[in-house]
Amino acid sequence: MSEVTRSLLQRWGASFRRGADFDSWGQLVEAIDEYQILARHLQKEAQAQHNNSEFTEEQKKTIGKIATCLELRSAALQSTQSQEEFKLEDLKKLEPILKNILTYNKEFPFDVQPVPLRRILAPGEEENLEFEEDEEEGGAGAGSPDSFPARVPGAAIFFEFKHYKPKKRFTSTKCFAFMEMDEIKAGPIVIELYKKPTDFKRKKLQLLTKKPLYLHLHQTLHKE
């Protein structure tokens, strides 16, 4: 096991324990955030190309299934129905599997499948992902957008962070995020921020920053 893989497994394990601790303490919003963030990281690893991963295809399939279970637990915490929930005690069975993923060779304990993830740039393509500096003094930064419009082109909801550039006298898009249709559900959600320009076709997405920066939303659904 390389030092990189060892460090990665330690980070995954720490994130898993944080989520489970929040869950057991009744801090549901924090648990959901932790579960969803870890699920996204696991999904990305599960879909990494062979030459960019130290895990075998079978191991990546198991990693993807763990991500699915994290999403199921997150959904259960947001649901008002008690039927067929994925329980915390079920999730805790997966911690030793994740910890020992390199040697795990048993049948996965739950009948789930990895969930496809929208495309993220592969390692090596992630260039210049740190925050861009504003070109003019006084311009709004990514953390304080002047406007935050949402659009629905096709089958996703897009959010654009915009700021006004006084010297050029126009409003520029700083970054954007989007939700897939299956992510539209009541409760909190954490989604990635991507570099401009807004890619409505979602063909070549590039994360805004290497740091763990996300858009946190809380959805309330109303029936007409």
Image (spheres, rainbow, N blue to C red):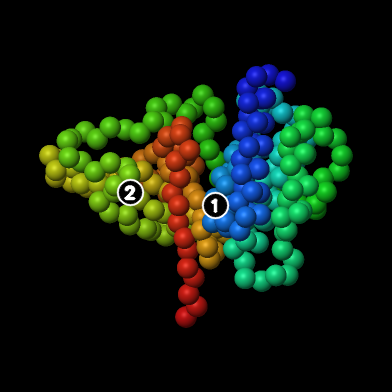
Mark positioned earlier in the residue sequence (1 or 2): 1
Q: Is residue 17 above or below residue 187?
A: above
Q: Secondary structure at mark 2?
A: strand
Q: Is residue 4 above or below residue 189?
A: above
Q: Is residue 208 above or below residue 22?
A: above
Q: Is residue 44 visible?
A: yes
Q: Label 2: how many residues lie within 10 Å, few (<14), some (14-19) or many (20+)?
A: many
Q: What residue is drawn where x is 33% and y is 57%? A: 149
Position of residue 21 measured from the top left corner of the image (x, y, whole percent): 64, 48
Quadrant in the picture for the N terminus: top right
Q: Residue furthest top?
A: 2
Return the residue at label 1: 30
Position of residue 188 measured from the top left corner of the image (x, y, whole percent): 51, 58
Callout in the foreground (1, 2)? 1
* Residue 159: mark in rendering: none
Q: Contact, CB < 8 Å: mark 1 with mark 2?
A: no
Between 202 and 78, the one nearer to me in the picture: 78
Q: What residue is drawn where x is 51% and y is 55%? A: 189
- Kind of residue at disc 1: Glu
Drawn side of residue 104 relative to residue 115, left or right? right
**Distance from label 1 to label 2 (Cα)?**
24 Å
Return the residue at label 2: 161
Q: Secondary structure at mark 1?
A: helix
Q: Is residue 66 above or below residue 100?
A: below
- Kind of residue at disc 2: Phe
